[in-house]
Image (tube, rainbow, N blue to C red):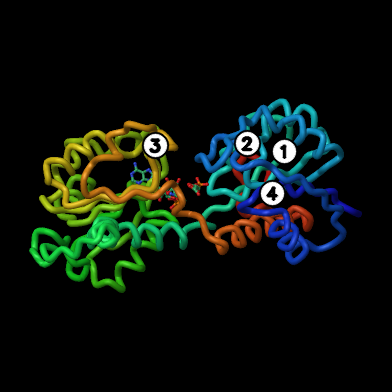
Amino acid sequence: MTIRVLAAGDHFVTNSLLIDALKREVPGELDIRELTLPWPVVPFGPVGEVKEASDVEDELIEALRDVEVCVTQMAPLTRRVLDASPALRLFCVSRGGPVNANLEAATEAGVAVTFAPGRNAVATAEHTLALLLAATRRVPQTHADLAGGVWRGDYYRYDMVGPELDGSTVGLVGYGAIGRRVSRMLEGFGAEVLVYDPYVDDVPGKVELAELLSRSRFVSLHARATPETTGMIGAAQIALMPAGSVLVNCARGALLDYDALCDALESGHLFGAALDVFPEEPIPAGSRLLTTPNLVMTPHLAGASKETAIKAARIVAADVARYVRGEALAHCANPSFATS
Ligand SMILES: NC(=O)c1ccc[n+]([C@@H]2O[C@H](COP(=O)([O-])OP(=O)(O)OC[C@H]3O[C@@H](n4cnc5c(N)ncnc54)[C@H](O)[C@@H]3O)[C@@H](O)[C@H]2O)c1
Ligand SMILES: O=C(O)[C@H](O)COP(=O)(O)O
């Protein structure tokens, strides 16, 4: 039996990556169609022109005609798309969460939704370390000095450079795929790692949040944005961090009070901070973040790498293979859904 599959790729997880992975992982005959989506479709962070999900629904509905399986990063699985696509049984999202799928509607329609946890853990962890070190070693500021023709000697003043990682305590808030990877990297730097994550057990260094904050010279956020984690690091929490500490957020803007962070950088309580994610993306013109001292920022790109895209395609294709073989799906997101 031939299964009709739609590869709905974009410029990150491309159709060619999705199709290569399907051909490698999935047994039997596939009839693969392709749709290339604009980047991004909401609700992903902005790169280039942002399209509303409703703008691509019509194209998607047309491409999904008689299609049983769809593999994609961005395609919006809305109630309207589901209603118009009765042949669809499996929708595989190559992201850390199936954020572009209406799970409730998909479950009602009998469509299994999968996702690709951990596919960007290495890229995000490496970027976290890059930002942490850039903020601590003042890399952007010293580069800007040099580019401006200034060779400053005062970086040899002890108060101008941050603490060494070796022998320092680093607090990780959130100990999932990325937090664990960062922890492994920090071992190589000789740092002591503390962890706050109420949902993991048996982790060496697990402490309560207040203890983590008050003992850590570096704090890095790696929890998902949930009602519980929203605003979890505000002025009171930053005040607990030792003077001269460094705070990094490569997780989600919602976790952190950015005004409180700017206050702590301006007062000098924090030595530095580094951010890859923001409450509003792109950062609006005139934002205080753009003029706050000792802040290193990148435009929500921590998870981006060629390897992330390849792993993402492989993870979703492996679940398509399980579906074809009638096995339980490894990363099924539907609550109380029969996964085989
Ligand atoms: N900047 C980027 O490009 C980028 C890329 C990938 C992921 N992310 C973000 O990084 C974060 C971590 O991603 P991940 O793949 O490791 O996710 P994950 O789901 O593997 O891990 C998240 C961890 O957060 C923990 N957690 C939940 N509630 C918590 C709480 N109240 N306090 C502390 N920890 C809590 C969970 O138990 C889990 O261990 C997410 O916010 C994700 O959206 C950002
Ligand atoms: O920020 C990304 O690449 C994204 O932040 C991915 O996040 P996700 O793991 O929630 O898809």
Q: Earlier in the sequence, mark 3 or mark 2?
A: 2
Q: Is residue 135 left or right of residue 28?
A: left
- Labels 4 & 2 near each other (Cβ < 8 A): no
Q: Residues within 10 Å of mark 3 (few under 14, many from 20)?
A: some
Q: Could you tell me which residue is drawn at 69 percent across and 30 percent down?
A: 108
**Gap between marks 1 and 3 measured at Cα:** 37 Å
Residue at x 32%, y 33% (from the top left corner): 287
Q: Is residue 317 visible?
A: yes
The residue carrying mark 4 is 9
- Residue 101, labelled with which disc? 2
In this picture, residue 305 sits left or right of residue 264: right
First in residue order: circle 4 vs circle 1: 4
Mark 2 or 1, nearer chain start: 2
Beta carbon of the mark 4 residue lies under 8 A of ligand 2: no
The disc at residue 283 is 3
CB of mark 1 within 8 Å of CB of mark 3? no
Horizontal and vertical percent position of residue 25: 73, 64
Mark earlier in primary sequence (1, 3):
1
Say which element carries label 2: loop
Q: Are marks 4 and 1 in contact (CB under 8 Å)?
A: no
Locate residue 234, reporting x and y percent.
23, 36
Q: Are marks 2 and 1 in contact (CB under 8 Å)?
A: no
Position of 136 relative to 61 (above/below)? below
Which numbered disc flags the more N-terminal residue, 3 or 4? 4
Q: Label 3 to label 4, Cα distance in Å? A: 27 Å
Query: Where does label 1 land, which residue?
Result: 111
Q: Tell me if mark 1 has few (under 14), some (14-19) or many (20+) residues whose alpha carbon lies within 10 angstroms of its own.
A: many
Dot 2 crowding, Cα within 10 Å, few <14, some 14–19, many 20+:
many
Q: In 3D space, how far apart are the residues under numbered discs 4 and 2 (Cα atoms)? A: 15 Å
